[in-house]
Amino acid sequence: MGLLVTLFLVIVNLLSSIMTFSPTSENITAISAWTLACIVFIFASFLGYAIILVVLYQNNEFMSRLANSKVAPKNMFGIMNSPWDVRKAKARKIDTVLLIIMPILFMCFNVYYWYDIFGSDGKY
């Protein structure tokens, strides 16, 4: 979490410096667009972290009933898992999905962005 906060502050400072020292224009510049997209991806990582924390620390009846029912997930020894184990497994699944999806989305954005900037139309 500390790394995300630090990264967010660095990117916001970078955007501020870009806006201050770049020539003024009516439209958004290419470097400003890329920096804003980076801020969006960092904010999405914050949201993913928040979702994982909510899943881990939610305290509701459903999770308790699930752990006490016969359909509750069991470990390899056939013992029913506690509500904490169920929440931890769910949070791990979310984390794994986000760990795969976020870098892929960032790479897709970069491929599109750089192709648009240096594409075959020759505008730059």
Image: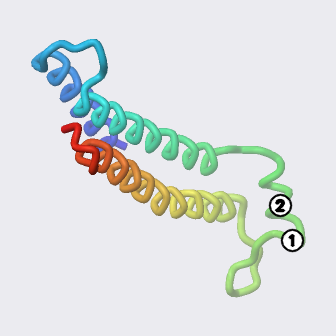
Query: Residue shown at 26%/37% (left/top)?
Result: 6
Image quadrant in which you'd find residue 77:
bottom right
In the rendering, at what x and y percent does residue 7 appear?
27, 39
Give the spatial CA distance, label 2 vs label 1: 7 Å
Mark before the other along the chain sequence, 2 or 1? 2
Q: Residue at x 40, y 54 (%)?
A: 108
Instruction: Give above or below for 9 relative to 21.
Output: below
Asked if disc 2 and disc 1 are in contact, CB closer than 8 Å, the reply is yes
Percent across and percent down for residue 24 are 17, 13
Residue type at mark 1 is Val
> Would residue 20 be found to the left or right of residue 11 on screen?
left
Identify the residue shown where x is 85% and y is 57%: 65
Looking at the picture, tell me which residue is in the foreground, 123 or 11: 123
Residue lying furthest bottom in this view? 77
Q: Is residue 92 above or below residue 9?
A: below
Q: Residue furthest front?
A: 121
Mark 2 belongs to which amino acid? Leu
Q: Classify 29 as above or below 121.
A: above
Q: Residues within 10 Å of mark 1 (few under 14, many from 20)?
A: few
Instruction: Give me the disc on residue 91.
Output: none
Mark identifier at residue 66 = 2
Q: Dot 1 corresponds to which residue?
A: 71
Residue 112, x across and y down, in percent: 37, 49
Q: In what element is the residue under mark 1?
A: loop
Q: Is residue 16 above or below residue 44?
A: above
Q: Percent position (x, y) of residue 46?
A: 45, 39
